[in-house]
Image (cartoon, rainbow, N blue to C red):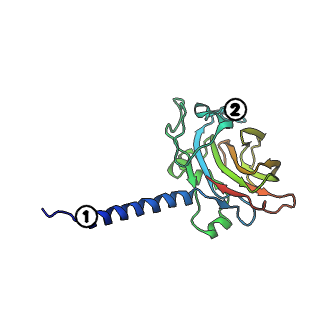
């Protein structure tokens, strides 16, 4: 057996280090920051679900159930990409193992047109199985503000939604309606730096299961300098 030269070993180590560096840089790039799209929509999210929402219309239990309680609770949510969800699924839960999966778009064209989160489509085969079934989904992102600033969150969902910003529940709108029926405008103050945004979306078992969120200034334009990270 021929011995491997010192130069060959050094070259192999250098190539390996370079590969690891590029891989790490790629992971960091996929975490953002990402700009809002031209209309002010948040396009990149971490998504977890589907969680159970048992009961009968309109009194489903999932709306008031904190499915993130075992990991600190909804108000404390601060997940990372592909982080497992810590929870104790009930016996009738369709899925027991869930992760915070990144919703990343492949191109600028996608960012122009694909700002609506279709949870059923995102979940793939799981989404097809819960189509027409009441469930709960979470969407999370970090809004990075260049300074303290007042913005408006323009939220549309199918069906109802709750929002938390930096651990404070902003409001809850339990409305069983289509995505385009109502846009909910919530004035909030972003602090300079990172702001944690969690949205809980309820599905009543009929129709779509969707969410879209804009971050706007007082004139209805995309909030200047605000970026999104995961």
Residue under label 2: 64
Query: Taking the image as drawn, is residue 65 in sight?
Result: yes
Q: Residues within 10 Å of mark 1 (few under 14, many from 20)?
A: few
Please tell me which residue is depicted at 71% across the width and 38% down the height of the picture: 167
Mark 1, mark 2: which one is toward the viewer? 1
* 19 and 174: which is toward the camera: 19
Give the x, y percent position of residue 153: 78, 52
* 136 and 33: which is toward the camera: 33
Give the x, y percent position of residue 22: 46, 63
Please tell me which residue is depicted at 28% across the width and 62% down the height of the picture: 9
* 159 and 75: which is toward the camera: 75
Residue under label 1: 6
Place residue 106 in its image quadrant. bottom right
Q: Is residue 82 left or right of residue 111?
A: left
Q: Quadrant of the N terminus?
A: bottom left
User: Please, is residue 191 above or below residue 226 in the view?
Assistant: above
Q: CA distance from mark 1 to mark 2?
A: 64 Å
Please tell me which residue is depicted at 51% across the width and 29% down the height of the picture: 91
At mark 2, the secondary structure is helix
Earlier sequence position, callout 1 versus callout 2: 1
Q: Residue furthest bottom?
A: 109
> Is the Cβ of the residue at disc 1 closer than 8 Å to that at disc 2?
no
Q: Residue furthest front?
A: 6
* 142 and 156: which is toward the camera: 142
Place residue 228 in its image quadrant. bottom right
Query: Taking the image as drawn, is residue 181 in sight?
Result: no
At mark 1, the secondary structure is helix
Q: Residue furthest left?
A: 1
Give the x, y percent position of residue 189: 81, 48
Q: Residues within 10 Å of mark 2 (few under 14, many from 20)?
A: few
Give the x, y percent position of residue 165: 73, 43
């Amino acid at each position: 057996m021929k011995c491997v030269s010192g130069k060959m070993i050094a070259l192999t180590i250098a190539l390996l280090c370079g590969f690891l560096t590029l891989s790490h840089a790629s992971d960091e790039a996929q975490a953002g920051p990402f700009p809002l799209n031209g209309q002010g929509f948040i396009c990149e999210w971490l998504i977890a679900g589907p969680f159970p929402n048992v009961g009968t219309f309109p009194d489903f239990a999932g709306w008031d159930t904190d499915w993130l309680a075992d990991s600190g609770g909804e108000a404390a949510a601060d997940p990372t990409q592909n982080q497992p969800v810590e929870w104790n699924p009930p016996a009738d839960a369709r899925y027991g193992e869930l992760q915070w999966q990144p919703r990343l778009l492949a191109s600028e064209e996608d960012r122009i047109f694909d700002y609506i989160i279709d949870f059923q489509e995102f979940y793939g085969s799981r989404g097809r199985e819960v189509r027409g079934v009441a469930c709960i989904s979470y969407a999370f992102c970090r809004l990075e503000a260049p300074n303290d600033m007042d913005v408006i969150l323009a939220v549309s969902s199918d069906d109802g939604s709750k929002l938390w910003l930096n651990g404070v529940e902003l409001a809850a709108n339990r409305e069983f309606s289509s995505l385009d029926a109502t846009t909910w405008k919530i004035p909030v103050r972003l602090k300079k730096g990172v702001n944690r945004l969690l949205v809980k979306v309820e599905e009543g078992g009929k129709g779509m299961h969707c969410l879209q969120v804009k971050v706007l200034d007082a004139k209805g334009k995309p909030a200047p300098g605000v970026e999104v990270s995961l």
